[in-house]
Image: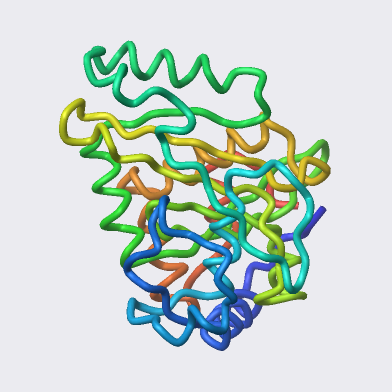
Amino acid sequence: MQRVYTNSTIWRSIASKIRKNLFSINDHFAVRSFSAVPLAAAAAKLHQPDIPCDFQKWGSIGFCRTSKFASGFNPLQPKPLDTIVDVHRLKDRYPEDIASIWDDYHIGRGHVGATMKAKLYHLLEHRASECRYFVIPLWRGSGYTTMFVQVQTPHMIFTGLEDYKARGTQASPYFTVSFYTEFAESKDLVLIRGDIVFTSKLTDSEAEWLLETAQSFYLNDTRYKLVERFNRETRDFEFKDVLQILNMPIL
């Protein structure tokens, strides 16, 4: 469990680490485009804005509930939506039916299933393009552990802050989330799937709470101001403000 540091020294240190670990990502890196191409080869083709850590390696394992992650790990091929559900049959369903089917499919399967309106997803996408990183305290018993969040739509990645501080680009993701936009235009619906990579570090209920909380910080105007401060005005960022807005005690 962790204590809160009221000064911004720790956040300046984290921001400095992020800047040192930046690298670009190709604009073709979407849900269907991950492959087991070595990172060094992929890095030579990158053109998009900088993001920290090995995003290809992190995002690629989002569809496999496994702890087999280490330096040199080969990215796995993620499942396209039509291998999870019958997309053709869903095209004739009402949005409410699709959301219900999607939620039911994930019950008891060790994954998190959720949906959101296309308008909200576009807002998340826009805000994440400007402010990609945040920190969220996860309450456990009499204290909390802090999670580092990276949002690179259509993906959202969570890892332990202490792991990130200690290992940088070698930090292992605890939980990965992918957003499917196949029904965004026709049904005003975006399907969300979360996969816990390390079940020893995160429970299903904790993963669900993290997803809901992360989305709230990007979609709620008041909460998003803290995300902006973390990304743009790190010197003025106070972690206690996050604790207060989540009604968590300052230890």
Residue 119: tell me if it is visible. Answer: yes
Name the quadrant containing residue 64. Answer: top right
Name the quadrant containing residue 4. Answer: bottom right
Residue drawn 33% across and 44% down? 219
208 or 222, nearer to the observer: 208
Residue drawn 27% across and 29% down? 189
- Residue 181 image position (x, y, % from top left): 30, 40
Name the quadrant containing residue 57. Answer: bottom right
Q: Is residue 173 left or right of residue 232?
A: right
- Residue 249 image position (x, y, % from top left): 68, 44
Q: Is residue 24 above or below residue 59?
A: below
Residue 226: tell me if it is visible. Answer: no
- Residue 93 image position (x, y, % from top left): 26, 13
Residue drawn 55% across and 79% down? 18
54 or 227, nearer to the observer: 54
Color encoding of the figure: rainbow
- Residue 161 image position (x, y, % from top left): 69, 63
